[in-house]
Amino acid sequence: MKHDHTKELNLLKTAKGQIEAVIRMTEEDRYCVDIANQILAVEALLKKANLAILKQHLNTCVKESIETSNFQEKTEEIIAILDKYMK
């Protein structure tokens, strides 16, 4: 199934731009707290993008697997991702 990842791509591209800015800030020896705040902003964008991708996965791939009674593999994938979040 093809997904529309426009929203997620925009978030990831924004995060990429922020990472480039963090690199420049570090190279310019900017104030450490400012750099740390920018890193937190990047992390927030990546989490938001990941959540959006997982939500779409649940609403499409997992839903489709439930309808076809082939959901064991998809369930295990989601559990593996949740396990990574919990660590």
Image (tube, rainbow, N blue to C red):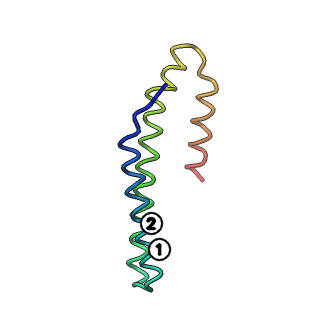
Seen from the viewer's position, the closer of residues 58 and 28 is: 28
Q: Is residue 27 above or below residue 39?
A: below
To which quarter of the image does residue 18 belong?
A: bottom left
Q: Crowding at label 1, few (<14), some or many (≥20) Cα neighbours within 10 Å?
A: some
Q: Is residue 31 above or below residue 81?
A: below
Residue denoted by label 2 = 19
Give the structural element (helix, strand or loop) at label 2: helix
Give x and y (percent) for residue 47. Answer: 45, 52
Amino acid bearing label 2? Ile
Disc 2 + disc 1, Cβ < 8 Å: yes
Question: Rounded to the nearest whole Å, what is the CA distance between mark 2 and mark 1?
Answer: 6 Å
* Residue 23: assigned label: 1
Q: Is residue 21 above or below residue 9?
A: below
Amino acid bearing label 1? Ile
Residue at x 41% of width, y 46% of height: 9
* Residue 39: assigned label: none
Q: Crowding at label 2, few (<14), some or many (≥20) Cα neighbours within 10 Å?
A: some
Residue at x 45% of width, y 60% of height: 43
Give x and y (percent) for residue 12. Answer: 42, 52
Give x and y (percent) for residue 37. Answer: 39, 72
Residue at x 41% of width, y 39% of height: 5
